[in-house]
């Protein structure tokens, strides 16, 4: 009898859209789940740890791995690369019922193009000004970069119709978004929540 593999759940949102906070909340709701550690070339932020938040790689190493076909999906965003490595995904799917990961819209398109089975969730901002404030509060981003991220956010929202579920992540009401996602995932996968 073949062992059941887990379900890959992709969570996308514009910059500042709450991907990490939503995934952390979902991990508490589904006990036999994990967050896939993805790979990036961006600098580590304060309080981040290599191998926990991301695998932090030099751009040249990332490009070599990309050329070798080691990535399920990848994206270039704000001058840095982000991606999911096949080995990380396969190991997680063998061990957990639900494997959560985050990626941008281009990453979702790569998964679709490669036929990688997944459930996709897009977190919509309730308002672009609130999104601007979230990005600003997070720190480490110039005003020009914030403007650029908001332009990208508008394009991402326009393309979010390709996702299985779209949920508004209202400021101060994250639990409402989490509940909607939990209900959807229980119905779609049969995996029970706490």
Image (cartoon, rainbow, N blue to C red):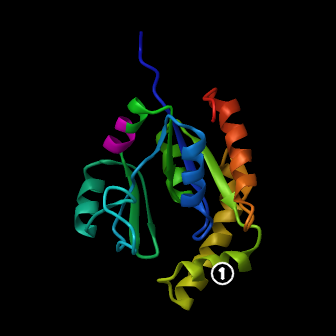
Start and end of the magenta stretch? 86-91
Q: Residues within 10 Å of mark 1 (few under 14, many from 20)?
A: few
- State the quadrant of the C terminus: top right
Instruction: Tell me if residue 146 comes above or below residue 193 in the rendering.
Output: below
Q: Nearer the viewer, residue 113 or 83?
A: 83
Left or right relative to 155: residue 126: right
- Which residue is painted at 58% across and 83% down in the image? 136
Left or right relative to 117: residue 92: left
Of helix, strand and loop, which one carries label 1? helix
How many numbered markers are drawn? 1
Furthest residue toward top? 1
Q: Position of residue 161 (x, y in %)?
A: 71, 53
- Which residue is painted at 76% across and 73% down in the image? 127
Furthest residue toward bottom? 143
Q: Which residue is mark 1?
A: 133
Q: Position of residue 193 (x, y in %)?
A: 63, 34
């Amino acid at each position: 009898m073949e062992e059941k593999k887990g379900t890959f759940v992709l969570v996308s949102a514009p910059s500042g859209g709450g991907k990490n906070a939503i995934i952390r909340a979902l991990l508490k709701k589904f006990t036999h789940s994990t967050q896939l550690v993805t790979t990036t070339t961006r600098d580590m932020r304060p309080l981040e740890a290599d191998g926990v938040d991301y695998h932090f790689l030099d751009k040249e190493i990332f490009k070599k791995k990309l050329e070798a076909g080691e990535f399920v999906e990848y994206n270039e965003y704000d001058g840095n690369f982000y991606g999911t490595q096949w080995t990380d995904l396969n190991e997680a799917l063998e061990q957990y019922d639900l494997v959560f990961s985050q990626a941008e819209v281009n990453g979702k398109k790569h998964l679709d193009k490669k036929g990688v089975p997944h459930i996709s969730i897009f977190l919509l901002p309730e308002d672009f000004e609130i999104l601007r404030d979230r990005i600003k509060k997070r720190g480490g981003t110039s005003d020009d970069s914030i403007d650029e991220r908001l332009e990208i956010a508008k394009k991402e929202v326009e393309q979010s119709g390709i996702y299985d579920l779209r949920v508004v992540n209202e400021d101060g009401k994250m639990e409402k978004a989490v509940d909607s996602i939990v209900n959807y995932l229980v119905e779609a996968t049969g995996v029970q929540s706490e």
